Amino acid sequence: METIWLYQFRLIVIGDSTVGKSCLIRRFTEGRFAQVSDPTVGVDFFSRLVEIEPGKRIKLQIWDTAGQERFRSITRAYYRNSVGGLLLFDITNRRSFQNVHSWLEEARSHVQPHSIVFLLVGHKCDLEAQRQVSQHEAEKLAGAYGMHYVETSARDAINVEKAFVELTREIFELVRSGDIKIQDGWEGVKSGFVPNTVHSSEEVTKGSRQCFC
Amino acid sequence: MSDSEASRTAAEGADTSSPSTPDISPDVAPTRKARRKPAAKPEAEAEETPAKTPDESTVSQGGWGYWGSWGKSILTTATATVATVGQGLTQVIEKAETSLGIPSPTELSARVPAEQKQEGESSSQAEGAASDGSSAVGSAMGMFSSLTNVVQTTGKTVITGGLDALEFIGKKTMDVIAEGDPGFKKTKGLMNRNATLSQVLREAKEREELQTAEEESSDSEKKVVAHYGMMFDEFQGLSHLEALEILSRDSESKVKSVLMTLSGDERVQLRDELDRIKESFSMVEFDDEEVDENKDEDGSEFERDLMEALEGLSVSATADKLCKACQDTCSTVRDMNKPQRDEDDDEELTKTHSVEEIHAAAIRSLAELTARSIELFHKLAEMILFSNGSTEAGVLSQLTVVLCKELSLLSKKFTSCLTTAGSTEKGDVLNPLITGVFLEASNSASYIQDAFQLLMPILEISHIQRRAGPSEQ
């Protein structure tokens, strides 16, 4: 008997406007690249299941925040219930990299008293010719803040799975080790459920027919 | 038994079950306006213990109410009145259930495993339509029973999912409850409680997922399941609701702290201004106007009303999504009605859509439209907070009315579709499906009206910011 999903993690995706947060999420959840997209207003929502180990599925509930400064006072309110997040910058936009620090500060101060696990993502890595931030530099910064670093491209579908799955694994380990605990009134991590087997004595069916994506 | 017959039976049930009713005046519906009026000092009231008003609760139950009254949330309605109307309620539930074939929540939980067992047995013999039907009953009642379970396990003072069925079955009864209902207090109570609406709904949904898992593990062939809660979540309705709640709570505490910093006349004046905003939220009447199910066949009328209500609110992208969902629903209904038209020419065509399919489509449509509506309210809240423009509560209540009417209209379209398609089905197959559609339509209206109420603190803080002038921003 399998679980539908073991845990649900709430992730928040933050970073400067136009670094490609929504595109990355849509590539991950919908499997396609949205060429044109309107700026996100406030927050939007996406979800997907990932299998981190055979039979172990995690439901990711992804909060896609607006990067524009004018929405900041609203988006701040949304950080609180996230267990983890992707912090994006655009490798062709140096300023977006310089803002990583302030994004991190802001997020960490607003998730208090909980902590939040971030993954640093250098996005638009298909645009190598216009690169303004070197991989080495980004890795150094990530290391300084205790984050991992991944370079992705939503357009060419590079490392998109990897970014989300890596973060999910990292959180999963922290949950498993007890460093992150499920708490009432906190939506960051929710426990899934094991289907009750009492009623199905005659025939146990294999595989899952449940799909959330 | 058709849908209107069902309602009538229920009405009679409601009448006879409360002989103590002193005055029956069926056409005078107590309005929501009247009930919500005591809004002047919500903070103080919210702290009070629920008023014990047994007399009040049994007074006038006249009138059929209207969409708005029975479309009220299990949560908002439940807070204070449980104790006072409990007895009459049980009777009515019994009556209504026997006449409509709705199992009581307790019965239901016992029945579900039994049904599953039964299905297991019958499927080995033949694929009887009856067993399919009963599985659909189970799923139609999914939300219903899981909410009950939430109540049982958490011990919260929610009147249980049974109320929802009741809201549909006996609007009169709802008015009884409503009479003892301290109006505005309920909503405040809801917001002040530890469990937020979206949390409770999430729990309900999780129960439902669990139930599905159990059902599926016992019967792999079942696939036409219509779980409102899960679909509502799939369309991100829960997330938008939660985000809206976050904004609402934040605004509420900001308003409070602003009031704390003021003193004397300034404070009195601001309180007065805020009271006026509160008032416009408590004066809303959700029209009792009969909805003609033949109108607005392609959803264009709804689109026009919606756009009119939203004029100048800059949430067009979200509104477009809602309109699209509505148009899709309308075309679904049209498609489902089609085969019936040439019934005489070709008998085989009539079987194109089973009642279970129509039911599933109805539940899905309701869930999607509701999720999109909540999304719209959430986006409105965000726009109001960051644009500094003034938004009138009247505009928002108008929007709420438009949305609730549309849900009412659609549920009627779907149930008449069901009635036609199921003309050859037995009552115990068809009725629960019809009930299920109305039940979830009632839920839908509740969510939308709750979302509307959540906007109040947002308008208040927006008012305060505007008042303070641009320097504040």
Image: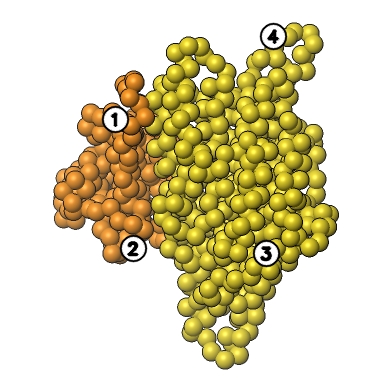
Chain colours: A orange, B yellow
Q: Nearer the viewer, residue A117 or B224?
A: B224
Foreground mark, 3 or 2? Answer: 3
* Amino acid tagged 3: Ser
* Residue count near mark 3 (Cα–Cα under 10 Å), binned few <14, some 14–19, many ≥20: many
Residue B127 position (above or below residue B69)? above
Residue annotated with mark 2: A110
Q: Chain of mark 3?
A: B
- Badge 2 marks a residue whose secondary structure is helix
* Amino acid tagged 1: Glu
Q: Which mark is residue A2?
A: 1
Quadrant containing the N terminus of chain B is top right
- Badge 1 marks a residue whose secondary structure is loop
Q: Which mark is residue B57?
A: 3
Per the model, the C-alpha gap separating discs 1 and 3 is: 49 Å
Foreground mark, 1 or 3? Answer: 3
Q: Chain of mark 2?
A: A
Q: Nearer the viewer, residue B447 or A144?
A: B447
Q: Confirm whether circles 1 and 3 share one chain.
A: no
Q: Which mark is residue B348?
A: 4
Total tally of numbered discs in the picture: 4
Q: Confirm whether circles 3 and 2 share one chain.
A: no
Per the model, the C-alpha gap separating discs 4 and 3 is: 53 Å
Per the model, the C-alpha gap separating discs 3 and 2 is: 45 Å
Q: Residue at x 62, y 20 (%)?
A: B354
Instruction: Specify which label sits upstream in the sequence, 1 or 2.
Output: 1
Write down the quadrant of residue A69 in the picture: bottom left
* Whole-percent x, y for residue B251 in the image: 50, 68
Q: Nearer the viewer, residue A200 or A89?
A: A200
